[in-house]
Image (cartoon, rainbow, N blue to C red):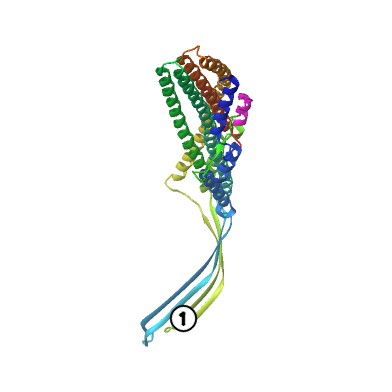
């Protein structure tokens, strides 16, 4: 077989595996589906909505509380009354009724500025929820992209294994032809058939892994797990990631670091809320009451009244068993812990970026090296296959060249995939994954 025909065979095997008749799912489409359907992202969005609804003047205690009340009491009794002049009055089944209703308003005028600290804390809670949503998005998109590009790598490996099966079939045909004309032994045919069976086994195992990974990606995208599709044929690497730029972006965008900074603000505001208990609480109250009563026996059988009531109440904590002091000390310790978390995350983030960037640079070098190895292994296989066809090299030398080529393809594909993993990790740490 000529080199030209050999290349045509490889391309045919590759195209048959990629399945161009299927839906081609791009990485951008996978991201869009994940943002829309992923369960963890949707729950994080709901939590952010809860935080937004909680940030209100009413939840902060700034607005008055208005209550309507109604109290209706009735009784039926046997009564007997003895008056001061000795007169005795009695009545069986005497009915009595008392009805009170109206509106009551209570408004906290001053609580040591606790309501303002609470209102600000609820606002920071929204910021925290927004960062938690961003963190959920980045974590899930990272998983989606890793699974997606794992599929691309597996698809490439599947095509490579399919190509080597095609080559092994050609080898069996050549060995059988050589045996038929008496130029080869039966052992050479058997060895070729055994190697073909080995290649077909590897192909089937890779095909199963590829199908199972497609199910995993469908689950991450929260769609029909049996949805059939193919992915992009190649992995494109962003080779322009520089460590100083990544560190600067991480300090501004890393959601976990930003969450710790917001938690520090929340801890300080909680301290203000606790500290407010040292000040008096002033509450204004007013109500408009209607009252009616009826009695079957007594000096007054009917009465009614209505009118406005108002007043101001002041409450001051004088002594509570030193609980106020303890609560403030606990709040200060939580502020200190939140600062330590920020410092710890900053150092951890820089270390993670440094390690991931070194791995990223190494993988970029490996891509160039493995690409060169694959090209040489391919040329060597073409030459070896032509020599085997005319019978000037043994079968073991051909098999070695074949395995060298398939292994070079797999290593090259794996190097590209590892570089992509490093890229995803760096962008996730920097908080710049596509949203």
Assess disc 1: are there few (<14), some (14-19) or many (≥20) residues with their C-alpha within 10 Å of its C-alpha.
some
Of 166 and 431, nearer the camera is: 166
Q: Tag 1's secondary structure?
A: strand
Tell me the residue that label 1 is attached to: 294
Q: Position of residue 269 (x, y in %)?
A: 55, 43
Q: Quadrant of the image for the N terminus?
A: top right
Q: Residue furthest front?
A: 181
Q: Position of residue 393 (x, y in %)?
A: 49, 12
Q: Nearer the viewer, residue 267 or 86?
A: 267
Q: Can residue 244 be seen from the camera position used here?
A: yes
Bounds of the magenta span? 236-250
Dividing the image into 4 quarters, which one contains the C terminus?
top right
Is residue 83 visible in this depiction of the protein? Answer: no
Residue at the (45%, 78%) spot, across then down? 97
Residue 230 % position (x, y): 55, 37
Q: Name the residue: 47% across, 14% down.
A: 397
Depth check, front residue: 111 or 415: 415
Q: How many marks?
A: 1
| Along the line of sight, the residue nearer the viewer: 107 or 313 | 107
**Magenta residue check for 384:** no
Picture layout, residue 424 above or below residue 23:
above
Q: Horizontal and vertical percent for residue 25?
A: 58, 39
Residue at the limit of the structure toward the top, as seen here: 392
């Amino acid at each position: 077989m000529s080199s030209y025909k050999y290349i045509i065979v490889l391309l045919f095997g590759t195209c048959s595996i990629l399945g161009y008749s299927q839906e081609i799912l791009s990485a951008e489409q996978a991201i869009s589906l994940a943002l829309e359907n992923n369960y963890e992202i949707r729950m994080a969005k709901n939590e952010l909505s809860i935080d937004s609804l909680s940030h209100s003047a009413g939840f902060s205690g700034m607005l008055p509380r208005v209550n309507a009340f109604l109290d209706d009491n009735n009784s039926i009794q046997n009564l007997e009354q003895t008056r001061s002049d000795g007169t005795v009055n009695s009545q069986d089944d005497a009915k009595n009724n008392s009805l009170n209703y109206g509106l009551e308003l209570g408004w906290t005028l001053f609580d040591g500025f606790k309501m303002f600290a609470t209102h600000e804390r609820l606002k920071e809670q929204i910021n925290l929820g927004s960062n938690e949503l961003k963190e959920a998005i980045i974590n899930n998109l990272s998983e989606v992209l890793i699974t997606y590009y794992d599929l691309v790598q597996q698809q490439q490996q599947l095509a490579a294994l399919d190509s080597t099966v095609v080559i092994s079939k050609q080898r069996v045909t050549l060995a059988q032809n050589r045996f038929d004309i008496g130029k080869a032994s039966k052992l050479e045919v058997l060895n070729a058939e055994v190697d073909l069976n080995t290649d077909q086994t590897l192909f089937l195992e890779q095909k199963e892994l590829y199908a199972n990974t497609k199910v995993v990606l469908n689950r991450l995208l929260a769609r029909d797990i049996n949805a059939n599709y193919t992915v992009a044929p190649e992995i494109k690497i962003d080779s322009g990631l520089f460590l100083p730029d990544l560190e600067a972006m991480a300090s501004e965008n890393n959601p976990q670091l930003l969450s710790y900074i917001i938690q520090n603000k929340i801890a300080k505001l909680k301290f203000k809320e606790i500290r407010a208990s040292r000040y008096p609480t002033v509450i204004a109250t007013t109500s408009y009451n209607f009252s009616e009563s009826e009695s079957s026996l007594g000096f007054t059988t009917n009465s009614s009244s209505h009118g406005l009531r108002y007043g101001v109440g002041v409450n001051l904590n004088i002594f509570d068993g030193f609980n106020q002091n303890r609560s403030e000390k606990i709040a200060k310790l939580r502020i200190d812990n939140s600062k330590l978390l920020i410092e710890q995350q900053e150092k951890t983030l820089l270390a993670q970026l440094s390690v991931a960037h070194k791995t990223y640079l190494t993988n970029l070098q490996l891509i160039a090296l493995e690409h060169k190895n694959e090209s040489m292994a391919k040329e060597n296989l073409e030459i070896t296959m032509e020599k085997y066809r005319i019978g000037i090299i043994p079968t073991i030398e051909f098999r070695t060249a074949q395995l060298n080529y398939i292994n070079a393809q797999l290593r090259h594909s794996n190097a590209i995939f590892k570089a992509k993993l490093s890229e995803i990790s760096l962008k996730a740490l920097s908080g710049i994954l596509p949203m």
